[in-house]
Image (spheres, rainbow, N blue to C red):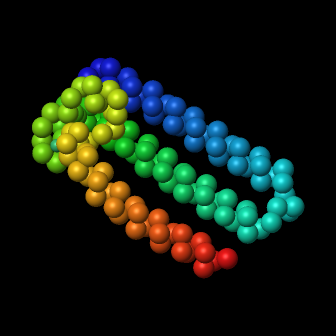
Amino acid sequence: MEEIKRLLLEEKAALLTEIREKTGNNKKINSDIGDAIDSSVEEQERELDLLLQDREQSRLKGIENALQRVDSDDFGYCEECGEDISIKRLLAVPLTRMCINCQSNEERSRLAQNAFSRADNFSQVLSDE
Ligand SMILES: [Zn+2]
């Protein structure tokens, strides 16, 4: 478990650096380009940034959550079936909350959902233009 905790802490540090670098870069880019940039492009890029930040934030939350569970010895059990998750799997994907069996079930249903929502986004982009 110590090794997992170390992994999570490293991951968290890397993610925080990444977020910090990204927000720093954005400010720089915006002031460099100034008014020259087409405002709709700028708008789209801002939305993309927000989306990325959202993803990073939720990843950060996931890491913190996992760290808490490591500390409370509540870590390494499948949330679906309650079985132990193999240490090999935890080292490969420390943020996982499901065993390999439940995960592949979950992924199968999520893939189906993603296919639908991607179609939605696509038609939205088309109608915007
Ligand atoms: Zn399971």
What x and y, as percent, mark residue 4?
32, 25
What x and y, as percent, mark residue 53?
54, 51
- What residue lies at 41% left-to-right and 63% top-to-bottom? 115
State which quarter of the image contains the C terminus.
bottom right
* Left or right side of 83 for 65: right
| Residue 101: quadrant of the picture | top left
Q: Residue furthest left?
A: 82
Q: Residue furthest bottom?
A: 127
Classify 83 as above or below 35.
Answer: above
What x and y, as percent, mark residue 56?
49, 46
- What residue lies at 57% left-to-right and 34% top-to-bottom? 17
Classify 18 as above or below 33.
Answer: above
State which quarter of the image contains the N terminus.
top left
The reply to whether residue 64 is visible in this rendering is: no
User: Looking at the image, in which quadrant does ligand 1 appear?
Assistant: top left
Q: Residue furthest right?
A: 36
**Viewer-side residue, 30 vs 37:** 37
- What residue lies at 28% left-to-right and 58% top-to-bottom? 109
Q: What number of labels is visible?
A: 0
Classify 17 as above or below 4.
Answer: below
* Left or right side of 63 for 89: left
The reply to whether residue 60 is visible in this rendering is: yes
**Viewer-side residue, 21 vs 39:** 39
| Residue 21: quadrant of the picture | top right
Classify 83 as above or below 1.
Answer: below
What x and y, as percent, mark residue 42?
73, 62
**Viewer-side residue, 49 vs 115:** 115
